[in-house]
Image (spheres, rainbow, N blue to C red):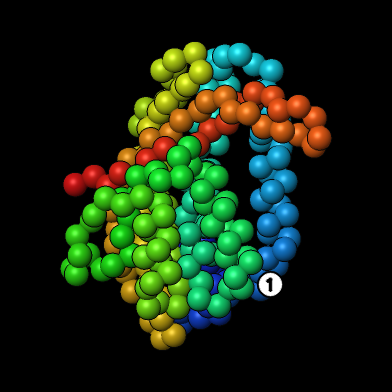
Amino acid sequence: MNRKIYHIIFLLTGFVILSSKSCEPDVDFDKEAWLIAEQDTIRSEIKEDFKSEYLWGDRLMVYGEKAKQKLLDFADYLSLYSGKNIDTLFKQQVRDMLYRLFYEKDALVELSVAPTNITGKKPANLNDLLGRIDASNYQSVVFAVSDLKTLEPLHMESPERYTGMLGCTITIFGITASDTILLNETLNTVKILTTRTKKQFGTGASIQIWQVFLHEVDATE
């Protein structure tokens, strides 16, 4: 496991894995500051390119990189959401942020928090995954993305829609009071989508802006 995974585990549980020499973070996790920073990022992103009718060249590359960041955010948000000790309001805020990463609320997400030797990979939507996380017996579940790459750059599917595909490995750990258990490690393809959506700024009229979304997370055989 890399340093970031250890850090997430520490933030969620306070559990330090003694075999690691790099798992001693000294920064307290400020939930309020984290939420404010994430919301500021979202506001900044949705104000970009709102006047553009089409996306070309460099702008498509930018949105492709934003999609990669959203996939990393997806793993981090799931890890935070899974913590059994987080308060109800914060959990709901993280849940809402997870849904906003996807174009559709019932997006296909082929990830399982059950050990591979107990149940195989089964197609599920995002809501199903969150329900399984809620029902798990682990103190927390940590999701980590690695080997992230662009398999298919964003390209025009229609004047209002650009699609592409990312590839990555998603590793899932279950955390108990005394152990860290590898639950699953799968190769995944992630469909991404950039389209214009209506957003309202302040009390003004809504306008059309470009946004990038995760569309589906598929497990490959």
Residue 134 position within the rendered picture, expressed as x and y whole percent measured from the top left = 43, 69
Q: Residue at x 36, y 53 (%)?
A: 170
Quarter of the figure with residue 182: bottom left
Quarter of the figure with residue 27: bottom right
- Count of numbered marks: 1
Q: Is residue 42 left or right of residue 201?
A: left
Q: Residue at x 68, y 65 (%)?
A: 31
**Three-letter code for the amino acid on which mark 1 is drawn:** Asp
Residue 93 position within the rendered picture, expressed as x and y whole percent measured from the top left = 61, 58
Residue 81 higher or lower than 39, as above or below? below
Q: Is residue 186 left or right of residue 190?
A: left
Query: Which residue, given by chain and number where applicable, does mark 1 sit on?
Result: 28
Quadrant for the N terminus in the image: bottom left
Q: Is residue 181 left or right of residue 90?
A: left
Residue 154 position within the rendered picture, expressed as x and y whole percent measured from the top left = 44, 24
Residue 74 higher or lower than 25, as above or below? above
Q: Residue at x 39, y 43 (%)?
A: 107
**Relative to the observer, which residue lies in front, 8 or 44?**
44
Residue 118 higher or lower than 154, as above or below? below
Residue 164 position within the rendered picture, expressed as x and y whole percent measured from the top left = 40, 28
Q: Secondary structure at mark 1?
A: loop
Q: Is residue 206 left or right of residue 183?
A: right
